Image (cartoon, rainbow, N blue to C red):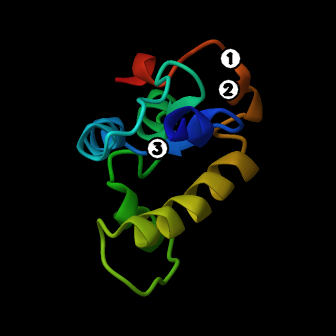
């Protein structure tokens, strides 16, 4: 169903407890629950584990921490995604997070 189609083909990168929001939304909308043990990564936990500057911030605060100006409001889903993207790009370009990290057997849940 939609839940498995949602998470089947690519990694889903989240920052923090978004897994709980996804579970709540699946339950509220009668959507089959995705397999949260595969292809879900908590960037917050990964960044904290790698001791990256800014890892303690919520997703909507990352862009301003990096000096990237965005229009919108923190905790708006689109704003938060636009804030996470430059942080992830910078962390990967600086070698702070390695692409191979997303190909390990570590699951989303292991980062809590």
Residue density around tag 3, few if under 14, some if 14–19, many if 20 or more, within 10 Å: some
The residue lying at 45 percent from left, 49 percent from top is 53
Q: Is residue 2 left or right of residue 92?
A: left
Task: For marks 2 and 3, give the CA distance.
Answer: 14 Å
Q: Nearer the viewer, residue 100 or 25?
A: 25
Whether residues under marks 2 and 1 lie with C-beta atoms below 8 angstroms apart, the answer is yes
Numbered tag placed on residue 101 in the rendering:
2
In the image, which is nearer the foreground, mark 2 or mark 3? 3
Q: Nearer the viewer, residue 101 or 6?
A: 6
The x and y percentages for residue 48 are: 42, 34
- Give the image quarter of residue 73: bottom left
Q: Is residue 5 left or right of residue 110?
A: right
- Give the image quarter of residue 77: bottom left
Quadrant showing the N terminus = top right
Quadrant showing the C terminus = top left
Q: Which residue is mark 1?
A: 104
Instruction: For mark 3, give the secondary structure.
Output: strand
The x and y percentages for residue 46 are: 50, 32
Q: Nearer the viewer, residue 81 or 33?
A: 33
Numbered tag placed on residue 14 in the rendering:
3
Q: Is residue 62 left or right of residue 40?
A: left
Instruction: For mark 2, give the secondary structure.
Output: helix
> Which comes sooner in the sequence, label 1 or label 3?
3
Task: For marks 1 and 3, give the CA distance.
Answer: 16 Å
The x and y percentages for residue 19 are: 35, 36
Instruction: For mark 1, give the secondary structure.
Output: loop
Whether residues under marks 2 and 3 lie with C-beta atoms below 8 angstroms apart, the answer is no
In the picture as drawn, the residue positioned furthest to the bottom comes out as 71
The residue lying at 47 percent from left, 25 percent from top is 108
> Which comes sooner in the sequence, label 2 or label 3?
3
């Amino acid at each position: 169903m939609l839940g498995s189609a949602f998470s089947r083909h690519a990694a889903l990168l989240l920052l923090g407890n978004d897994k709980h929001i996804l579970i709540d939304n699946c339950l509220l909308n009668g959507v089959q629950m995705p397999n949260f043990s595969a292809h879900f990564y908590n960037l917050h936990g990964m960044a904290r584990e790698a001791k990256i500057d800014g890892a303690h911030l919520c997703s909507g605060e990352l862009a301003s921490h990096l000096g990237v100006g965005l229009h919108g409001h923190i905790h708006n889903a689109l704003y938060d995604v636009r804030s996470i993207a430059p942080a992830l790009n910078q962390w990967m370009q600086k070698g702070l997070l390695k692409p191979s990290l997303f190909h390990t057997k570590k699951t989303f849940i292991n980062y809590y």
